[in-house]
Structures are given as C-alpha cells and as structure tokens.
Image (spheres, grey):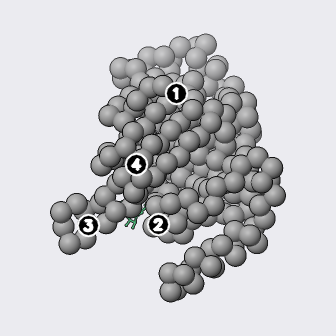
C-alpha cells in the first residue's frame, strides 16, 4: 500500500508568491489498485505524483510504501520500485542512443551504469521479445536511434522501459496527451495490458475523461490540492463522463470562471 499522510506542500515559501498547494492531504492506494486522476490545470496532480516519486520534498507529513517510511528517501532510490512515464515522450527515452542501448539502460536502472548487458545475446533476445509485444515492429530496429522514432513509438518504448525491471508502482502523467487519437488509444491499450500482466499499482493522470472512466478501478478528481471526487469499485464503474463534466463545470462556476 502507498500512503500519503497529512501532506503539506508550499511553493515559493517566504516570497510574495507563496502558495499552499496541499494542506493535510491524505491518500491511500491499495496494492494492485489502478487510480485514474483528473482535474483542472494547476489542481495539483503533477505535484502529487512528484511527491510520491520523491521529485519534490514535502513540508510536512509522511509517505509510506507498506510499513516503510520513504518520506526522505531520494528519488533515485524510489525509482527502483516506481516506474514513471511523462507527457513528453522525449522524457522517458534517450534520443541519441539506439533502441537496444535504451533497453539496456532501462534494464540496468538502479545499478551502476554499464551497457555491457546490452550486448549479451540472451538479453538482446529478451529485449526483442519485449519490443515485439508492442506490435510496432521495433524489434527489427534495434540499432536505430530512438530520436528518429515517432512520438507514439517513443512513448510505447518509454512505457516498456519504465516497466522492464520489476517495479511495484507505475506513475503516468498525461502519457497520451501528446499523441494522435489512434496512437493514444494504442498506448492506453498497452498500458492496460502491462498493468494487468505485471499487477502494478498504478496512478494515471489524464485530461481524457473517457480514459479516466474506462480505465482503472478508482477515480480521483483533484481541485485546489484536494480530491473532490474519490470513487472506487462499483461506484467508480458507474461514473460517467457527463458526471465528471458536470462536476468540472460546477467547480469552474464556484471559482468564478
Ligand atoms: N516548482 C514549482 N514552483 C512553484 N509553483 C509550482 C511548482 N510546481 C507547481 N506549482 C504550482 O502548483 C500548482 C499545481 O501545479 P501542478 O503542476 O501540480 O498542477 P497539475 O494539476 O499537474 O496541472 P496540469 O493539468 O496543468 O498539468 C500550480 O498552481 C502551479 O503553478
Ligand atoms: Mg500536470
């Protein structure tokens, strides 16, 4: 289980721009749960993911994975247990390296840097098999530089790379936002498959309400650093896109927009 307990987070502390984003924020995500997160721009979704991944510190509160307090664990250590895919496909892959080198890099996550395993025949076959599972023909392009691939192909690789080592958590931040509708669909189907196969506890931020409704067994809507909707199980399954739109509009009116 992943737990955020009484998290407070301020930005620009001590300046005229100081803002409190989270005040006593709590979130418990059960093992194996797939949480879809929606919410307006600036509602705190990425900040929440950054807090989970250790990319930004909290001002108070504690973060647990199971019984382990990871509040002060550095990001690179958390990465051994947490895979992350960003909105920009360029964030999850190295453009100047080949597909094979990228796979070897991902395979060695958390270990001291070396690419030797990338040339190991068995390992190369393993990468090829994984790439084949994407159904994009990348298994035949091992020596092609990742920078020449399309955004969708790169994002598929980013997803594969982030889940290549045995992680427990998958963190997705608008990972289909930069893709055309058809490619976005492909990446979402792939995401659903990987999450299921690897039994990953997943938090997926998306502005695509249909994906939020169709995927996952829990749905959060964030607003000003709070979860204003939090539905799981059957109640989540019953949530419709119209319900979310209605809530968005109500919030927007409350905020005077
Ligand atoms: N590093 C930072 N320094 C100062 N303020 C920040 C920082 N990161 C985020 N914020 C502020 O915190 C608030 C929440 O930002 P965050 O990026 O978490 O929103 P979001 O829900 O991910 O939005 P979006 O849908 O646009 O990606 C915003 O008001 C933003 O300006
Ligand atoms: Mg964001």
Tell me which numbered mark, 2 or 3, is placed earlier along the sequence: 3
Separation of disc 1 and disc 4 at Cα?
17 Å
Tell me which numbered mark, 4 or 2, is placed earlier along the sequence: 4
Separation of disc 4 and disc 3 at Cα?
17 Å
Q: Going by the picture, which residue comes out furthest to the left?
A: 14
Label 1 crowding class (10 Å Cα cut-off): few <14, some 14-19, many 20+? few
Q: Quadrant of ligand 1?
A: bottom left
The N terminus sits in image quarter: top right
Separation of disc 2 and disc 1 at Cα?
27 Å
Compared across the picture, whether 184 is left or right of 237 comes to left
Task: State the residue position of label 4.
Answer: 7
Task: State the residue position of label 3.
Answer: 18
Looking at the image, is 122 positioned above or below residue 221? above
**Could you say which is closer to the camera, residue 92 or residue 10?**
10
Separation of disc 2 and disc 3 at Cα?
15 Å
Q: Position of residue 146 (x, y in %)?
A: 52, 42
* Residue 112 position by quadrant: top left
Compared across the picture, whether 226 is left or right of 218 comes to left
* Residue 116 position by quadrant: top left
| Circle nearer the viewer, 4 or 3 | 4
* Residue at image point 64% right, 55% down: 230
What SS does tag 2 mark? loop
Label 2 crowding class (10 Å Cα cut-off): few <14, some 14-19, many 20+? some
Separation of disc 3 and disc 1 at Cα?
33 Å
Task: State the residue position of label 2.
Answer: 224
């Amino acid at each position: 289980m992943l737990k955020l307990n009484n998290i407070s987070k301020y930005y620009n502390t001590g300046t005229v721009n100081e803002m409190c984003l989270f005040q006593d924020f709590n979130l418990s995500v059960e093992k194996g749960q797939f949480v879809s997160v929606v919410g307006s721009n600036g509602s705190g979704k990425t900040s929440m993911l950054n807090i989970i991944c250790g990319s930004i510190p909290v001002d108070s509160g504690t973060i647990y994975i199971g019984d382990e307090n990871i509040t002060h664990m550095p990001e690179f250590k958390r990465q051994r247990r947490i895979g992350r895919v960003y909105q920009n496909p360029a964030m999850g892959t190295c453009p100047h390296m080949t597909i094979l080198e990228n796979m070897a890099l991902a395979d060695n996550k958390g270990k001291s840097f070396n690419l030797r395993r990338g040339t190991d025949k068995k390992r190369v076959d393993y990468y090829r098999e994984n790439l084949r599972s994407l159904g994009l023909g990348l298994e035949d392009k091992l020596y092609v530089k990742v920078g020449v691939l399309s955004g969708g192909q790169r994002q598929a690789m980013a997803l594969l790379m982030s889940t290549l080592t045995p992680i427990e958590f998958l963190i997705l931040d608008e990972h289909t936002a930069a893709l055309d509708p058809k490619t976005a669909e492909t990446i979402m189907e792939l995401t659903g498959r990987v999450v299921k196969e690897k039994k990953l506890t997943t938090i997926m931020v998306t502005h695509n309400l249909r994906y939020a409704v169709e995927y996952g067994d829990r749905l959060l809507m964030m607003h000003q650093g709070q979860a204003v909707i939090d539905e799981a199980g059957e109640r989540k399954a019953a949530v419709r896109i119209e319900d979310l739109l209605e809530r968005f509009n109500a919030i927007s009116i409350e905020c005077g927009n």
